[in-house]
Image (tube, rainbow, N blue to C red):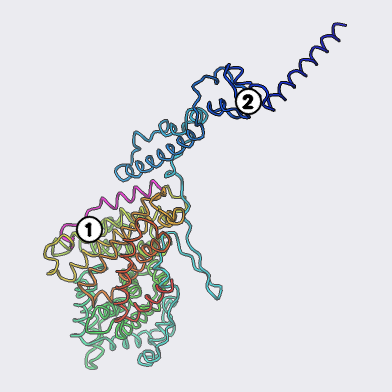
Amino acid sequence: MRDTTASRRSSSKLAAEEEIELRRARGELSCAECKRLKLKCDKKVPCSSCVRRGCPTVCPHGSLKNSQGSRSILTDTDGLHQKVFEMSQRIRQLEDALRLLQSSLSSEKHPLLRNDLLSIKYGPEQQLSVPSDSVEDPLAEPVEAFGTLTIGDGGESRYLGASAGSETLLSTESEPEDHPSREQAIPELLNNLAAMFPVGSRCPTGPKTFENAMRMLLLRLPDRPRAWTLCQSFLEQASWLFRPMTKEELMEDIMNPIYAAKEEHENPQLEVNSKVSPHKLSILYSIFALASIVDLTLPAFNEEGAHYHHCSRAALALRSIFDSPMVETVQAILFMAYYCSNSAQRYKRDSVWILVSLGSKLAQRRRYSCRTDRDPARWNMDATMAERRRTLFWEIYSADVFHSLALGRPPSIDIAYVDCGLPKAQGDSDTEHQFWNWKYQFTRKIFDSVLELTLGARSTDYKAILEVDRKVRETPMPPALDVFLASDHDNMSLNVYMKGGYLAMIRSITMLYIHKNFFARALIDHPAEPLASPYATSFLASARSASALIRSAATHISRFPDYCLRWWNLWVHIFSAAMIVGSIVTRAPSSSMAPAAFTELGIAVDLFDHGAKSSQRIKTVRVKKACL
């Protein structure tokens, strides 16, 4: 009986509560929250009191807890959340700016960028729920930078590594070697030998053919006055950037013995006693070819230079480059690579890289007579020979590194296995000493780090990129070669001026190798304003380096216009810099950097337009640039 009565009371209570809920929903009773706080309710749904207090969602049936229900509830909760979000975004931007500034000054983390302070912007609730070490630094994340794989119309593939730039597009195809007039002017035997290099191991028909070929090569040398003029042109105008051998070595060990043998072959009354290495003959022909490029009395990329290069290839094929290579073998290959990279349009950059790699491997052969990566002092060589070996090694290492970076390919020499010391000063002036010392030091300390970061198999840490950037910026220019600070640079010789210009430009070129991948990511991820990207440092560094490179090149071309038309590598880097500023103009036209980039692009276009009037090769580049 009692259970029945209790059940009836419970049912009546539920019915009464449901009736109250229905009446509140119809606006006949005050809402539950106004009743709890004893406030006057206008009986709307939601009522004005709940709306004013910021809790319209609980009206009319719900009510806040005592801890939530004070009269101090803010009235504009949505506006407050929006304000907190905007302030958090602003804090993130300031933290990014502080992080970039600190990275340019020091490798240490700024005290205000501690993990516990970085988590403040997430609010007290999220700060408690998120561990302090979960706030990651975006600059510390590994960055995957892949290269480029191109596939030609015939299905042939070509890989370019991460550091390879737009300038590699200039050498994707080789020009067919079709010069019937030149081949008719050169004996068939020499043509066959030239075609054999570098696969051929020895002259196939025996000693008689060897002697016959050597006689032909000696007789085709220019007369001694012309040879002397070519050697002087090479030493004064072509060897300012590289020196696989000194002037004394060229004259005493190469030119004089070869011309003594030439005179013996030309005079039938003299007995032929002089024995000349065919690889030394190849060196001399390559020097003549390089001198022909810089001979301003001849057209750029002339046939005389191509003729000398053809004979150099034939001489190099007369003796095996693989069996017991000598020092002159490495020198001959290096000189040939210099010519191919600066003149011969039919050679792709890949071919030059392979040629330099071949010379690098020959330089590491485990023979006392040739190996140059080990310091000569280990074998108690005389001082002169030791210095020649050191100079040769650092020249071929520099060429190997530079071509590897240009194509994004691994180098043939790992500096970790090298103990060859830097050569001592051999120049007569302080300028000479400063240039060669700076070049080799920069190659060893900076280029090696750039290779490891840009071409290594591991993902790149962006902080490591910024550290290498700092090293490049802190590398001072040699005072005697700073052409932009010198007051009398108009009176500088071509040799000194080009040395200073190269050192000024190589830092900008290095910065492009370091930053171009991250420049592209900033441009793609933040086209409206790339400076808002986490990689804004790389974007800014690339833009400024490209600008500096274009303006430096314009200064050099205005100073020595005829000579610069023949320095092919200069135009290659102008093209690369033009692609950087052109990308800013076309991909981020609303960026704050776009107006300055447009100005630099105009300068580069004017340079190519002017150069195309005098050089067919530069004209070809201008056409490719227009197509891109």
> Is residue 161 rendered to the left or right of residue 57?
left
Residues packed near mark 2 inside 10 Å, few (<14), some (14 to 19) or many (20 plus) = many
Residues packed near mark 1 inside 10 Å, few (<14), some (14 to 19) or many (20 plus) = some
Q: Which mark is residue 43?
A: 2
| SS state under label 2 | loop
Quadrant of the rendered structure where residue 194 is?
bottom left
Quarter of the image containing the C terminus?
bottom left
Quarter of the image containing the N terminus?
top right
From which residue to which does the magenta span run?
462-483
Instruction: From the viewer's side, name the closer residue of 605 and 232.
Output: 605
The amino acid on which the numbered mark 1 sits, given as a three-letter code, is Asn
Measured as percent of width and height from the top left, residue 546 is found at 32, 61
| SS state under label 1 | helix
Q: Is residue 8 magenta?
A: no
Q: Where is 1 relative to 612, above or below?
A: above
The residue at the point 56 percent across, 25 percent down is: 49
Q: Which residue corresponds to mark 1?
A: 437
Instruction: From the viewer's side, name the closer residue of 522 and 354.
Output: 522
Q: Looking at the image, tell me whether mark 2 or mark 1 is earlier in sequence order.
A: 2
Count of numbered marks: 2
Measured as percent of width and height from the top left, residue 329 is found at 34, 71
Q: Where is 368 relative to 39, above or below?
A: below
The residue at the point 18 percent across, 60 percent down is: 482
Instruction: From the viewer's side, name the closer residue of 550 and 474.
Output: 550
Closer to the eye: label 2 or 1:
2
For the question of whether residue 391 can be seen, the reply is yes
